[in-house]
Each structure stands twice: as structure tokens, then as C-alpha cells.
Amino acid sequence: MLDPLAAETLGGGLGLYSVERTGYGYKLTFGDFIQPPEMKKWLDDSQAQLVGAPAKFGVLIDMRQLKPLPDESQKIMEQGQKLYKAKGMERSCVILDNPTTTMQFKRLAQQSGIYAFERYITARSTPDWMTRAMNWLTKAEDPDK
């Protein structure tokens, strides 16, 4: 298992996303306005990172800087959510700051079947968001309670 602070990173050429393997599983970071070609590259990079993934893992998704996704990018994101679930994702926590993006990702999680074990934290109103997220991913302590 990797040190929780250590990370192996793959990322988009334009800095719109990164995929990091961590001690608890994976950290995904998304920013700006991601068009379908860049989202497809994220899916391909995710497939590469998930080779040899642990049987069960957590995923922290930092979307504080992400703008709402266009329809085609949403479809690719949904494929990615299903991929992470199929490869062993046990819990995930999404950190957001945009109400439209929050609604969009809750809907996508329902469609992809991961909603029941995904939690959403609004960073702006939750100063200890990282602690809450890590407690959910590593200890199953629900940040909503």
C-alpha cells in the first residue's frame, strides 16, 4: 500500500484533470471546462491507473474548480464512474463548490449506480472537508451525520 501522502499521478495535457494513486485508493482532480476529448483521455488514464488496483479502495474527487460538463463529457464521466466501481471502489467522496455541478454529479452517480456510497461535501461551507472526506474513505464515518 502506498503512503497516503504519496501519489503516482497521470494527468491531462491541459491541466484539466489528474489521477493519483494514494494510500487509500485514488484522488481525482478536475478543473475548468472539460470537453469530450479531454474527458476521454481521463477515462483512458484511469483505465491505466486501475491496472493492479487493490480489491477495495476509496476515491476522493476534488471538483472545486470544475465547471458543469457538456452532455458528451457527462456520458464519458458516467463510464468512468462505472469503471471505478467495477475495479473495486468501495466509497467515494466528491468535494464541490458549484451548485450546478453538485446537482449534475448527484444525477450522474444515480445513473451509474454509485450514489449509495458516494458522499458530497461543499468545500466553501465545510472548512474541515478534507478530514470529513478522509474519515468517510478510510473509516466509513459518514460526513452527512
Image (cartoon, helix red, strand yellow):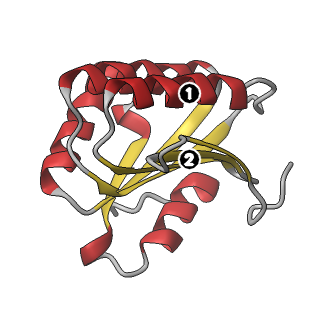
- Residue at 59% from the left image edge and 33% from the top image edge: 89
| Left or right: 67 as drawn, with respect to 116 | left
Name the disc covering residue 84, or none: 1
Q: Look at the image and tell me in which quarter the C terminus lies.
A: bottom left
Q: Residue at x 37, y 49 (%)?
A: 119
Query: Measured along the vertical axis of the image, is residue 56 above or below residue 68?
Result: above
Residue found farthest to the front: 14
Q: Badge 1: how crowded within 10 Å, few (<14), some, or many (20+)?
A: many
Q: Nearer the viewer, residue 70 or 107?
A: 70
**Given the image, on which type of amino acid does mark 1 rest?**
Tyr
Q: Nearer the viewer, mark 1 or mark 2?
A: 2
Q: Is residue 97 left or right of residue 64?
A: left
* Amino acid under disc 2: Ser
Image-quadrant location for residue 75: top left
- Residue 79 at x, y percent in the picture: 42, 18
Ranked by sequence position, the earlier of labels 1 and 2 is: 2
Please tell me whether residue 42 is drawn above or below residue 21 in the rendered image: above
The reply to whether residue 52 is visible in this rendering is: yes
Q: x%, y% of residue 21?
A: 71, 46
User: Which type of secondary structure does the marked residue at label 2 adopt?
Assistant: strand
**Foreground residue, 49 or 4?**
49
Distance of label 1 from label 2 (alpha carbons): 15 Å
Work out whether residue 113 can be spotted.
no
| Residue 22 x/y as whole percent | 72, 52
Query: 111 above or below 25?
Result: above
Residue nearer the viewer, 81 or 90: 81
Q: Which residue is mark 2?
A: 18
